[in-house]
Image (cartoon, rainbow, N blue to C red):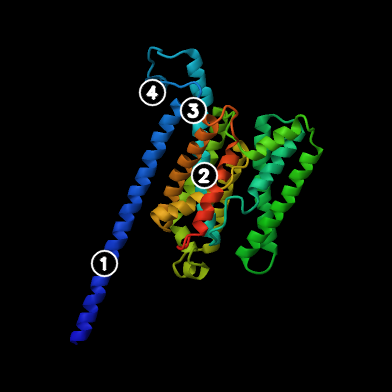
């Protein structure tokens, strides 16, 4: 009896210690998320003032306040145009795209139970690339290029899902293989578009679009994609605890009363909308959705209740920081897609060569 009593006491102590440990980890994750939020806000404020034509902090604050309460102008008309038409939309777009690509990558990795999955796993990026290349060949306007890229991105993912629905075997594996196949098909189509494009004009536009860039960002673009991005992020944020269950497998999800297939479809649709909208306005920006979720796991753990908001904040801050480097490092601006690859690839190599699992 005494041994049983001692055993129960030990189990009780272990249970208390486990609860305390989980509480400490949760508090640490909350602190990290709060720190990421502060970092993002500070970086955005600094970015508004940085550039080849710097703006004083007082002037930047005054111009923002002037949108709500009329103030006596302490800035020039040129500064106002630069601030509202060039710098502000670019910073907002960088924050939005970084946030959405990161959270889409995290959601895909949990849904497919694969740490190497990125937002373009279902071919959305290559589909968007073909849509943009085709629109450029046909002489469409920049707005029409974005619309074409968005539509083809959605069409590509729809094609992948239709193929996987008709195929036999492991459903998740079939979806990934269908995504690889369709991506290769559209990549070949993009190559053909580059082959027949006019080398003096159209080819340069297609190549530059494929590199990814935030140059020329406009408030109209921000206003157009913001509702789509807001809906996608809201859905993924609301489903974050269910993504935790998806990582356990379909059988475990069923025992907990969760329809894994339905949740997986909702997550894929939301993540696809985010990816398609982002790629349609910025071009192909890689590595953000692959690397950032892994870095967040190192900081806040694998709990998607913490991982989703952490990925949003870190992704937004990361892409804004890279964009600041892109527009300030050299006189000839570097496409942001190149910089994210330079930063992302070595960092991912570091992650996969660590002794701990990513």
Q: Nearer the viewer, mark 1 or mark 4?
A: 4
Instruction: Specify few, some or many for label 4: CA neighbours under 10 Å numbering under 14, 14-19, or 20 or more.
Output: some
Instruction: Specify few, some or many for label 1: CA neighbours under 10 Å numbering under 14, 14-19, or 20 or more.
Output: few
Please name the residue that numbered disc 2 is placed on: 100
Who's the residue at 72% across and 31% down the image?
Answer: 140
Q: Quadrant of residue 132?
A: top right
Please name the residue that numbered disc 4 is placed on: 57
Label 3: state its secondary structure.
helix
CB atoms at circles 3 and 4 under 8 Å apart? no
Pick whichever of labels 3 and 2 is earlier in the sequence: 3
Q: Position of residue 184 (x, y in %)?
A: 72, 53
| Disc sitting over residue 88 in the figure | 3
Q: Marks 1/2: CA distance?
A: 37 Å
Pick whichever of labels 3 and 4 is earlier in the sequence: 4
| Disc sitting over residue 17 in the figure | 1
Q: Quadrant of residue 284?
A: top right
Who's the residue at 77% across and 33% down the image?
Answer: 138
Q: Is residue 3 above or below residue 262?
A: below
Q: Position of residue 63 (x, y in %)?
A: 42, 20
Q: Nearer the viewer, mark 2 or mark 4?
A: 4
Q: Position of residue 257 (x, y in %)?
A: 45, 66
Q: Nearer the viewer, residue 124 or 262?
A: 124
Pick whichever of labels 1 and 3 is earlier in the sequence: 1
Q: Marks 1/4: CA distance?
A: 49 Å
Who's the residue at 57% across and 44% down the image?
Answer: 342
Pick whichever of labels 1 and 4 is earlier in the sequence: 1
| Disc sitting over residue 146 in the figure | none
């Amino acid at each position: 009896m005494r041994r049983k009593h001692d055993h129960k006491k030990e189990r009780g102590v272990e249970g208390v210690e486990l609860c305390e440990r989980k509480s400490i980890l949760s508090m640490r994750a909350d602190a990290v998320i709060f720190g990421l939020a502060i970092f993002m806000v500070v970086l955005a404020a600094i970015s508004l003032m940085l550039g080849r034509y710097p703006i004083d902090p007082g002037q930047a604050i005054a111009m923002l306040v002037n949108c709500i309460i009329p103030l006596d102008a302490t800035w020039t008309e040129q500064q106002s145009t630069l601030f509202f038409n060039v710098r502000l939309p670019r910073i907002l777009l960088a924050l939005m795209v970084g946030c959405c690509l990161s959270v889409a990558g995290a959601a895909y990795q949990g849904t497919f139970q694969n740490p190497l999955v990125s937002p373009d796993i279902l071919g959305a990026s290559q589909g968007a690339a073909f849509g943009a290349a085709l629109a450029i060949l046909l002489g469409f306007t920049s707005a029409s290029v974005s619309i074409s890229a968005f539509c083809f991105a959605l069409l590509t993912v729809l094609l992948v899902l239709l193929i996987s629905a008709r195929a036999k075997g492991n459903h998740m594996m079939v979806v990934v293989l269908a995504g690889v196949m369709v991506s290769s098909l559209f990549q070949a189509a993009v190559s053909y578009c580059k082959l027949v494009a006019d080398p003096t004009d159209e080819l340069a536009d297609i190549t530059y679009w494929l590199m990814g860039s935030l140059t020329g960002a406009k408030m109209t673009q921000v206003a157009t994609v913001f509702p789509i991005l807001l809906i996608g992020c809201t859905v993924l944020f609301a489903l974050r605890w269910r993504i935790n269950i998806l990582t356990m497998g379909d059988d475990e999800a069923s025992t907990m009363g969760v329809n894994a297939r339905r949740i997986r479809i909702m997550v894929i649709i939301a993540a696809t909308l985010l990816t398609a909208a982002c790629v349609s306005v910025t071009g192909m920006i890689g590595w953000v959705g692959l690397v950032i979720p892994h870095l967040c796991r190192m900081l806040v753990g694998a709990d998607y209740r913490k991982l989703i908001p952490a990925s949003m904040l870190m992704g937004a801050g990361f892409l804004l920081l890279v964009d600041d480097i892109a527009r300030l490092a050299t006189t000839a601006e570097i496409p942001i897609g190149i910089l994210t690859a330079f930063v992302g690839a070595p960092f991912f190599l570091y992650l996969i060569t660590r002794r701990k699992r990513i």
